[in-house]
Amino acid sequence: MERRRFLSKFMSIAASATVVSGFFKRAVARTDGYDPKGHYYGMGIQIDKCIGCGKCVEACKEENNVPKEPFFFRTWVERYVIKKDGETSVQNTDMRIERSNEVFTERDILRSFFVPKLCNQCDNPPCVQVCPVGATFKTEDGVILVDDERCVGCRYCIQACPYGARYLHPERETADKCTFCYHRITKGMLPACVEVCPSQARIFGDVKSSASPLGRFKRMNKLHVLKPSLNTEPKVSYSGLDGEVR
Amino acid sequence: MKMFLQKMPDALKRVLAVFVLVAAAAVLVRVVLPASLTDSRLHIKSTVEREMAHPVRYAGSEACADCHEEYKVKQGGYHKNLSCETCHGAAKEHSENPSELKPKLPRMREFCAGCHTYNPSRPSGFPQVNPAAHNPLKVCVECHNPHDPKPTRTPQECSACHAEIARTKELSPHAQLECTNCHTVPQEHKLAPRSVRAGIPSERSFCGKCHSKDSGRKEAPKVDFLTHGEKYLCWQCHYPHMPEVQ
């Protein structure tokens, strides 16, 4: 066989094989009625309204089977106390660890407030970048999820998250984090923490829609995000955020 | 076949070997490995489906409004923005099986205190009490309807707290006198009754205004203040709230 003829035949077969294999790629289609394309979720938090009752933490643990021990949180509330001598103290309100030096008399306090925290569902998530097995990813509707069947529990993402929003689930040994209660929001319900918040400190909605509580929150308040210098572009924004909040 | 291989140029044989290896790798990835490991879209889809299949525990207050009339009462009061499940706990199971699975009914003082205990970090204006000083032995629901809580109102009448004295006084010759006729009542006494006390007459001449020989009040029994019990204050012997002043 002539070399030229053989090569041309060989190339044509190889080319057609790639084309055919492309057709075999399984088409991914959604089976349920929910269309993630129409949504892009975010949350607003009003610091001035949080009373630090911890109902959100309780509800989150109940709704999402988060271990009850006070080391595992998908959402938590921090109490900031800025003293007159300029010292700032931060305490997780749910840790229930009374440290002798953490008792404040009202006279020492310059200002004090609660900051509810959760996964910021970053638009540019560092946790997704570092995952070596691609177990964590951003969905079309902007929520960062973890595939617990693929996660190998290496903890890179826990280290990478600048907000400390992830923890290693003690039973599954995989990374776990806030999903904005993905199973609820896709059914048109509110996340559990937003549902139970007694003072409406948390507002959930679509970041694009203007005629919604979140849209109104964004219009009426001066907003901040946590650690904006890291360019993670959080979708959780805060109003009334103090400069001391880290 | 042997002839064919011998005829084939050496370089082509090597290219063919590489091609066979590549093809084998492709087969391994496409056929042998499960699709969920190789196709990121599939693994994302399965994770999203698993997340969406999580059971919902918090039903949302719209579900409560269908059966419970208290919902309407709540909507008119200060707790209107509270979700029912903030206090009653996750109630999705109750909404599906209302007769058998009952939600929580918290009646302990500690429960209300979770939000309403004074804490300098809470936003100012939020109703807070010191549970140790605020009617310590009563449960909150005895005075405040949790579905329509009213802000604490300062008691306008002394009998609100001093009911026993008020009932005794009604039968005494002093029945017509207002409490404030003899007692000085600072405004703060109504707010902090134990730390700011009401005043009692500290001088004999106070009773003398009616009971001394030279007083203008004809109906009041008269005594000679110069000879009668000069060492003592009147109320150390005569209890003025008693029906028969001895």
Image (cartoon, coloured by chain):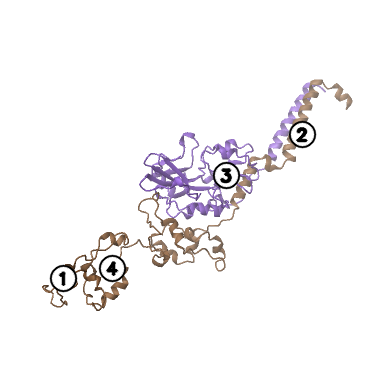
Chain colours: A purple, B brown
Mark 1 chain: B
Q: Earlier in the sequence, mark 1 or mark 2?
A: 2
The numbered disc on residue B208 is 1
Residue assigned mark 4: B158
Q: Decide: is A172 above or below A246.
A: below
Q: Position of residue A6 (x, y in %)?
A: 79, 25
Answer few, some or many: residues within 10 Å of disc 1's Cα (few below 14, many 20 plus, some between 14 and 19).
Answer: some
Mark 2 chain: B
Q: Which is in the foreground here, disc 2 or disc 4?
A: 4
Q: Are marks 4 and 1 on the same chain?
A: yes
Q: Secondary structure under badge 4?
A: helix
Q: CA distance from mark 2 to mark 4?
A: 95 Å
Q: CA distance from mark 3 to mark 1?
A: 78 Å
Quarter containing the N terminus of chain B: top right
Residue assigned mark 2: B24
Q: Are marks 2 and 3 on the same chain?
A: no
Q: Secondary structure under badge 1?
A: helix
Q: Which is in the foreground here, disc 2 or disc 3?
A: 3
